[in-house]
Every structure is written in structure tokens, then in C-alpha cells.
Image (cartoon, rainbow, N blue to C red):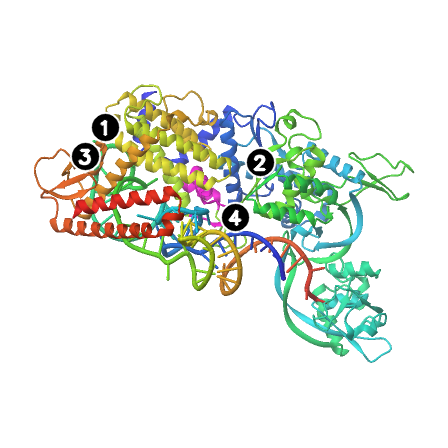
Amino acid sequence: MADERLKALEEKTRYESGEVEARVFAEWMKGGYFHPKAEGDPADNFSVAIPPPNVTGALHMGHALNGSMQDALVRMNRMRGRNALWTLGTDHAGIATQAVVEKMLAKEGTSRQELGREAFVERVWAWKEEYGSRIVEQYKRLGASLDYENERFTLDQGYVRAVYRVFKQLYDKGYIYRDNYMVNWDPGSQSAISDLEVENREVEDTLYSIDYPVEGSDRVLTVATVRPETMLADTAVAVNPDDERYAGLIGEHCILPLVGRRIPVIADAHVDPEFGTGALKITPGHDPNDFEIGRRHGLEEIGVIAPDGRMSEAAGEFAGLAAAEAQEAVVAALREQGRLRAEEPYVHSVPFSERSGARIEPLISLQWFCRMDELAAPAIEVVERDEVRITPPRWKRVYLDWMREIRPWCVSRQLWWGHRIPVWYCDPCEETYVAEQAPERCGACGGELRQEEDVLDPWFSSALWPFATLGWPEQTPELRAFYPTSFLTTAREILFLWVARMIMTGLEFAGDVPFRDVYVHSVIQARDGRRMSKSLGTGVDPLEEIDAHGADALRFGLLAMSSTQDVRFSDAKVQQGADLANKLWNASRLILLNVADVEAAPRPRTVEDRWLLSRLEATIASVTARLEEYDFAHAAAEAYAFFWSELCDWYLEIVKPRLYESEEEVSATLLWALERVLALLHPLMPFVSEEIWSYHPSRRGHLVVHPFPEVEESLRDPAAEEEVRAGIELTRRLRAWRDLVEAPAATVLPARAEGVEPREFVGRLARFEFEADGGDPVASVGPVKVLASAEIDAEAVAARLEARRGELRSEVKRAEGKLGNEKFVARAPAEVVEEERRKLERYRMELAELA
RNA sequence: GGGCGCGUAGCUCAGUGGGAGAGCGCUCGCCUCACACGCGAGAGGUCGCUGGUUCGAACCCAGCCGCGCCCACCA
């Protein structure tokens, strides 16, 4: 190694992530390591399709966690020599992207309507070209080993082809149809949205009770509603068929106040006789339940609220008012007519759009739907049979429950940014064409065609992600080599929106499941336990964490935090990662600056060497197993514990004298151990491990493609582990003893060992001299007799002895009690009883020594 | 209304049938020639409550009390 490099290593006593990460990442990119060959079989290769972030997005903690997990597995498998592909791409994110550009236009004093559709879509593309790569650059900061050479976008040319192919085939199968149906209308984005994009929130409204007079009688039916303005669209009053109070009224009519319409009194089991008066006003045009009831009874569907949130012509004198204004006006009119019986505060849950935040306006509109039951059936089976494994397993049932109740999916959106639905209409002859490419003219009359205005729900295209990104519908080498992908990590909130749909389309169109494993990761909450949210201001910015502590620190921290349950963001865990990076750096300096010029190899000379090698292999086995079962938190914790405690605190301290003399055996062994530790940690902390590796004398190429350590069973040595463990235990007891008697830290205390000779390191690390002459024994610590000396306070020793005797007496009592229990001796497993007897024996012996 | 998860050291979390753990924080002692982002030694938990099963329960079962999430059409 060049002397300047060694000198730099010697001088840098701290690991500085800031001056390493960009340089190392550039080296990886230059090496082309992230772009695998499209060769081999999917079963031997490893591939992951990144959950595509929105083009408008910025890296948030969820991305960082998800990315850290995916990258750990992709890196591990790449190191194992597999063709490892982590597919990169972004989602066009209809509403979000359209909203960003619309906001820009508003600032310029114009609007999308003013621009027109074509010019607007061009503007969005221009925006995407300029700003759409932000989040990709942010993934690089995290160290994500994505295939940056092949970035996909849900609206790129090939992808659109895949979307149109799927739409056409679903249409031809009869799954896709157009219908007038009740949808969740989002007045914010001026579009229909799917059930899954609706969230219910508790709201305090007023519950109005209104009297509907019964035709030809003095009776009134009192109905209750929180939306009195919708009464203008009422077409019936419903009561429960078993409700005796109203039995005689079924088939009669009410006269709708304000409107004067005759509406029938009908019987429907949906009505709860216990609620209110047991009479329910039916508004098929503006309430999902009423819509269902209306269809059952063939009621007229009247719409009085238009898509813009204002009252339509059908609202008569209220036309043109905003719905809220209409509500006030209707209530006032009813009050004036004496029809308003009661108003009371009422808390109930109300649907809101997750996209725009606006209160959902249920209304009937002409939309495109996709029937899901046939697609769902095989997607249910593959999960039932664990051909797609869901981890943690409790989500399997959640998935299955939802899939078994699946309902048609409203796939059309009234937006301009997205996949314009590939349907063309001929107005004169009322023909409809569904095609992958625009037909020239109408086949029937030769007339001009008009393309459907609506675009597809962005989730429609996301549903094709694992195979569309690999080039489907072409049978590309990528598709052959990397489909099915190996696994998917995701947040539980998109289990239905995305994961379930990918499984359905994968089976239907790509002929196989889209991935073998789904790992549903936990949610990282804000430090105070609230959800991280931009609007609440509770988000923690991963890029700030990277700037402050390094990408490795953040990655380690997130993996260490992750578990199967939600956790609060922990600054301490990120700090632990930063500390670990620094510790790695410094332990490596110690090793690299002192070793002899030898090949890295396990060359144990002492039992401590065999101990370290054995512990290292145990750690490799365990950490690897944890990663393979997606237990990232334990993988991180175990790697940390081995490195920090066993390798640094014990082994390095034990072998320092040999290392300073540049002994060959210990040098070779340490270089070997360091190489394996760096490789093992690389998937978790890629930057610092790669950087240190650049100083390692065994280095021939980058660590990113260095073989991942395979367990060497021959290095396992239980006897050495036990012997050194005992030495460590004795060292600890001696240190604790000297602290208790307040012996000065630097002094070496005289002692004699009886029976077995303690390992050399015990005396050195605990600062005891076992060959000491003279002095009377003042205390026993295990096999060690401590001799009297000026450094030791006799009173403290006496107190210590008494305390230890107390401990021993209580241990003896506990063990005696247990062994005195006949049932314990009779029923507990023999080895448990035997172990208890051995303990009792030991305690009695030590107590006898101290007496 | 149904389902799921969680209540363990001051804090954040592991542990899921045989003597309570980690990181941080705290106390004491160390600038020991890799690291003070360090080293050594400690203090600190009747494992939410009540019953039950078991020789033995933080762990299994039942009930209760708190907290969170998901699904669901009660006006």
C-alpha cells in the first residue's frame, strides 16, 4: 500500500461520512455493479422492483426504511454472485403531479383549462423532465444500489403499451365495462376516486329531523338526516318490513316538502327500526346505501348536486348554490314551513379524499369499472398455498379477507395527466372501439372518432409494475431472467391498493406470481409517537439525518428500529449506527496499521484465536439467517454486539501485545476476521465498509462485489468458546472486585491463583499479578486469592466479602428450595434438574471458601 | 359492529415456558500508545390488573383496564 494512504489512515482518528460517501458511490457507478446481466434463471437470480415513488416525491423516512431493507438484501445477494437487479422507476402519480403543475399555472395567472389538454400535458412532461429526478438522486444519497442505467416511468412509451395491452385484454374478457354507478366524487381533484383512497373521519354535524306528510292523512313520517339539502333528490321513504308502527303505510306515499313530489313508502330490511324514528329518507343519487336500496326497488335516481359541488338545475330554486349554502337555505325553508322537527349535534364518520382532503360527495356518474372476482380467485389461491409468502403472517389473513370480499374497481379518473383510456367513440353511429392503438376512423360509418376523455387510475398502471418494468408485453431477456421477482417490501397501507393488484395482474398477464415474498414493514412514527406527516410538521427528513450522521448511520438506525410492530423514530439508534461506523474505522486502523505483511487467513495460535474465529462464524451464521428471514433489527443488533463487544472489547484487547509485535499468526487472523466482518456488514453499512476495505491488503476489487461470507463450520470450536468465556467471566469478576474495594485504577494487585492457572489475559486486563510473593490472602475471587497490599482497604474487603456471602446464601436457599420440591424433581426434565444441582454445588463450595 | 396489534429499567425497544436484556440516559472510576462518537465498574424492573393451567408463567388460557391501527352502508 502506498505510504501516503497509510499515513492518511493513521491521522484520521474519526470516520467522516461526509467526505467518503459521494466518492465511494461514484466508484460503484463507474464500476457498473448495479446493472446486472439479464442472464440465467429467476430462481438463481435475485430481483426486486422498487415500490415506485411519485415523481413529485421527496425521500421520506418510509422510503429510507424500505430502501435500506431492499438494499441490504440486494447487496447480500449480489455479493453471493447472483445476478441481482433492483429495478428503479417512478410513478406518474396522477393527482399529485397534476396538482403541482396546476399550482404553477395559477401563479402564472393561467390554468389548465385555458391551456387546453394537449398543452397542459406537455407542460407536465416539461416539469417531469426538470424536477422528476429529485427522488432518484436522493436514493443515491442513501446508497441504494438500484439499476440507475435503466430507469422506468409509468408513462414511458413501453409502459403505456403494457397498460393498453392489459386494458384491451381485460375489456375483451368482459371484465372492464362502463356504467352509471355511485362513485366517491372528490370535489378537490374533480375526479372519482376509489374506495381505497377514501378515509373516514369523525365529524360533528347537525342531525335534522324532518316531517314528511303522508298523502291523504294527518300522519307524518319523521326522517333524520345530516344532509338536508339532499332531500331535494329523495325518491322514497323506507321503513323496516317488520316494523309494526309503519306496517299500514307501506305502499302509501309521502309528499316531499319544498318539492311537492309524491314519493312511495317502501319496506327494506336495511332500515334499522331502533335508529331515530325508524323511517329513512332515500336519496339514491347522493348516498351509497340509498343507491343500493334504490336499485333494489327500481327507484328514480335524481342528482341535485353537480360535480362542481353546486346545486344543479334539478334543485329548482336552490340551483347554483354551493351545497353548504343550499343546506342553510333548505333548513330555513323547512323551518318556515314547520317541517323541521328537531336539530341536534351529531358525531359520525364522514368520508374524505386522501388525495385532496376534500369531503367526498357521493354521486352517480358514468365511469369505467373493472370486475375483480375472476382475477381475485387465483390471487387468493397463491397466497393460501404460500406461493406468495406474506411476512409477518398475520397480514396473510388481512389480505385474504379483503380479497374474498373484493368489489368492482372504478378505474377511470377525470384527470388529464395519466394513461388516457384507450377507448374511442363514434358519435354518429354510437360505436365504441377499444384498442391498443388509435383506430383511424369508424369501421361502421367511416366517421371520425373521439377518444375517451378520462384517464386510468394510477394504480391501474402500478399494478403491472413487476413485469411492465421488465419489458412486458415483449418477451425480453430481462423478463426471462428476473420475473418473478424475489421479494417486495411495502407499507401495509398499500397491501390492497397495490400488492393485491400486482398479484392479480401478474398471474393473469405474466403467467406467474410477481414475487415470492412480501414483507410488510412497520411504520416509523415521529419521535413523539404521532404519525410522521408533512402537514403536521412531524416528519424527520432522512436527508438531514444523512448530512448529520451519514447514510450508514441512518441505514443501521432504521434497520435496528424496524420490527414487526410500529416504532418511534429513535435518534439514539441512528447515533448508534454512527458510533458503529466510527468504531469500525478505528478498530480497522488498529489492525491495518500494525499487522505484519501476511496473507489474510485463519491462523489460530492460541485458544483466544480459536475463540474469536468460532464466535465470528457463529455471528455470520446468525446474521445471515436473520437477513434471510427479514429480521433486520436482530441482524443489525447481533452484528453490532459481536463486533463491538467480542471483537473490540475482548479480542483486540487480548491480542494487542501480539499485534504490536506484528506477530504473523495474529496478523493473518485479524486480517481474515476484518475482511469477513466488512463483507458481513456491507449490506447494512455499505459506505464505511467499502471505504475501509480500500485499505485492506487483500483487496483486489470493490467490496460491493466481494463474496459474501459463507460459514466455515471447521472454525467452530465450542471448547475454545467455553474456555475463553470462563476467562472473560473471571476478568469481569476481578474488575468488579477491585472497583468495589476501591483499588486505584492503575495499580496492579498481588494475587495467587490456585488450582487452574487463569489465562494470561485475565491478569493483564484486570490488572492482577498472579505470581506475587508474600502477603496474606485477604479474599477469594473464584480461584484467585487476592493478597494483602497497601492499595486495598481492609474494611472495604470485609464489606465485600459479607455482601458476597449474602448473595451466595440466597442463591443456595433458592436452589435448595427448588430441589426440595418433589414435584420439580419428579416432573421437570432431567437436564434442568441436573443443572440446578450443579449450581447448588458451586454456590456451596464458594460459600465454604469464604467462611 | 368486526378484526389486528401493543402495554417489560427514567426513555425507545428486544425477549414469548426453566434464574429479567440492549441502546440511550444516570452514578462511580479512567485522557490505559484504535476510538473520550472511547474504556472499565455499577445503580435501576412485584414484565398493565385479576384469575386459571403448569413442578415452574414476562411468556400459555380467560376476563378486565389503558393505547394504537385496519375494515364495515346505520340515516
The subunit carrying tag 4 is: A
- Write the residue at 44% across / 38% down: A635
Q: Is residue A560 magenta?
A: yes
Residues marked 3 and 4 touching at CB (< 8 Å)? no
Give whichever of A751, A171 is nearer the camera.
Answer: A751
Label 4 – label 2 distance at C-alpha = 19 Å
Q: Do the dots labelled 4 and 1 sit on one chain?
A: yes
Which residue position is annotated with label 3? A755
Residue kind at label 4, given as amino acid type: Val
Q: Is residue A471 left or right of residue B9?
A: right
Residue kind at label 1, given as amino acid type: Pro
- Mark 4 / mark 2, whichever is N-terminal: 2
Which residue position is annotated with label 2? A487
Magenta region, main secondary structure: helix
Residue kind at label 2, given as amino acid type: Phe
Label 3 – label 4 distance at C-alpha = 56 Å
Label 2 – label 3 distance at C-alpha = 57 Å
The subunit carrying tag 1 is: A
Nearest to the eye among marks 4 and 1: give it.
Answer: 1
Residues marked 2 and 3 touching at CB (< 8 Å)? no
On screen, residue B39 above or below A535: above
- Mark 3 / mark 1, whichever is N-terminal: 1
Residue A29 visible in the shown view = yes
Q: Is residue A316 left or right of residue A761?
A: right
Which range is magenta?
A541-570
Label 2 – label 1 distance at C-alpha = 48 Å
The subunit carrying tag 3 is: A
Give whichever of B30, A6 is nearer the camera.
Answer: B30
The subunit carrying tag 2 is: A
Which residue position is annotated with label 4? A523
Residue kind at label 3, given as amino acid type: Gly
Mark 3, Cα crowd under 10 Å, few <14 / some 14-19 / many 20+, is few
